[in-house]
Amino acid sequence: MKIVLHMLLLFFLVLVKSDGQITEQPLSKIAIHSAVPAFHDGASIKAYPTLLGLKGEDAEWVIVELQHSKPSNDDWIGVFSPAKFNASTCYIENDSKVQAPYICSAPIKYSFANYSDSGYAKTGKTTLKFLIINQRADFSFALFSGGLSNPKLVTYSNFVSFANPKAPLYPRLALGKSWDEMTVTWTSGYNINEATPFVVWGVEGQRPMRSPAGTLTFHQNSMCGSPARTVGWRDPGFIHTSFLKNLWPNTKYTYKMGHILSNGTYIWSTKMYSFVSPPFPGQESLQRVVIFGDMGKAERDGSNEYNNYQPGSLNTTDQLINDIGNIDVVFHIGDLVYSNGYISQWDQFTSQVEPIASVVPYMVASGNHERDAPGSGSFYDGNDSGGECGVPAETTFYVPAENRAKFWYSADYGMFHFCIADTEHDWREGTEQYKFIEQCFASVDRKKQPWLIFAGHRVLGYSSDKYYAAEGSFDEPMGRASLQKLWQKYKVDIAFYGHVHNYERSCPIYENHCVNPEKSHYSGTVNGTIHVVVGGAGAHLSEFTQINTTWSVYKDYDHGFVKMTAFNHSSLLFEYKKSKDGKVYDSFTILRDYRDVLACVHDGCEPTTLAS
């Protein structure tokens, strides 16, 4: 009976709460399947320049000039790619008798015609600017009347394209399975039968090395449902990953992506990138880690595609870019893009984070907006992924998991040991993931790696979110029931979560009781884990309950992220920074010795004997 009640409660929470308050993808507001032709001789659109990337740029501004003799405040412009957006490739799900729509692919972004000129409805003339990134195809700009819910195609522009639409772009680094390995993943338009991908890399001034890359992609029939399988589908191109091995610790390397065409021609990334290799596990040096969840993406041109949908996303991105010289590794713990089945948005996101991910390892975790789809094997049976069922996330980003469809993995960075959970798969005692989590905790040598960090997307620990408060346990249903004894037994320092779009820090806690009255400086025996919700990196904010949760040390209803700095084996600084200004609003320090980790605490003692 208890199991039935638990599952009913879980189902209820899936219905009322995904990860805060807003889960709608803005592109889903467009009823593109209902679009009809309504061409008008008195309307025209001109887009220029028509050829982009002549100097190797992967993003350029396009000016769109619009004239319409019958203007309305409901008029909007959609950016389509590929430029020909007719119904020739429509996929009609489940019913072959359904008449194919006039347009079956959603635009990659849109803006209302009056966005930059409130007088458009009177003059019928306006000029807009769109920031266009290279997405392996050409572009066109279409004018619709009738608003988003009843779109009527009035006219469309000339085509715009990049000089090399297939160019290798948007590199993202990730830690490999061994400490002396870095992976480079990028996107291009070249399949292996057309070109061979590789990375040239090395220490500046020394002879460069060349490493091959593997190539992956996915197809429309890889998607688990709509809209990813229908109106949201867009070809993702080809995803290449190269493994740079036998790195010297703390060494600066440069790298460049390349492709050899079948005729022997070399195609290169236009930039030379660089990274600093990880330290040896246990090595004592300054080590800085940034962690957050639920950032999403936003449009720098102000287009309505994400207008006020991820209001903190660009602020967080820009703070990290500005401080990139003081960051060693980034963990984005789920809800990466909020594409929700609109595949074009993955390119947009990798472009947005490229100044970060091309310089430091950008480690990701799986969230409900990456994985959850009905009947797909996810622990939650909602459709928060919009039919993606984890495929774009698992393909677009590399993680050092044994099976990337099961998104749990461990990672080492110097004095840190990370255990990353996949909260969209069952984590309870007896499951495959539970065994992984315990093995990950048990495998670390705390003398060498004193800072043991757990992270997952959904809140398996503690949160004052109003929906969790209504449930009564202040966490995901069945969240910490199985895991809290592992956190205590292995003396996990900090557990991080996203999903709830705010910031909150608990006291060191075990079984709902604070075990340390300190709030800003912790020293001595490790007794209890500090739980941190850091899901406010970009998405719409989540409200706190009015209930006074005595274990909560600090709450913030704002966008932000966490930075941890390990100075040595005994000293750690924790800082919460707001995305709007990069200033520190919450912090604490941990100061301790190795013997403090070994000390016996409640439910965290090694067995002893009286024998001498």
Image (spheres, rainbow, N blue to C red):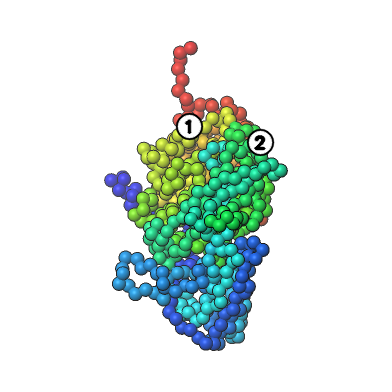
Q: Which residue is mark 2?
A: 285
Q: Residue furthest right?
A: 205
C-alpha separation, residue under disc 2 versus residue under disc 1: 24 Å
The residue at 48%/84% (across/down) is 39
Q: Residues within 10 Å of mark 1 (few under 14, many from 20)?
A: few
Residue 314 occupies quadrant: bottom right
The residue at 62%/68% (across/down) is 52
Q: Residues within 10 Å of mark 2 (few under 14, many from 20)?
A: some
Rendered location of residue 286, percent (x, y) = 66, 38
- Mark 1: which amino acid? Ala
Helix, strand or loop for disc 1: helix
Give me the disc on residue 229: none
Rendered location of residue 428, percent (x, y) = 39, 41
Q: Residue furthest left?
A: 1
Q: Is residue 10 above or below residue 540?
A: above
Helix, strand or loop for disc 2: loop
Give me the disc on residue 442: 1
Q: Is residue 302 left or right of residue 550?
A: right
* Whether residue 404 is visible: yes
The residue at 57%/45% (across/down) is 211
Front-lying residue, 105 or 58:
58
Front-lying residue, 257 or 356:
257
Q: Is residue 371 above or below residue 485?
A: below
Rendered location of residue 217, percent (x, y) = 46, 55
The residue at 31%/68% (across/down) is 95
Q: Earlier in the sequence, mark 2 or mark 1?
A: 2
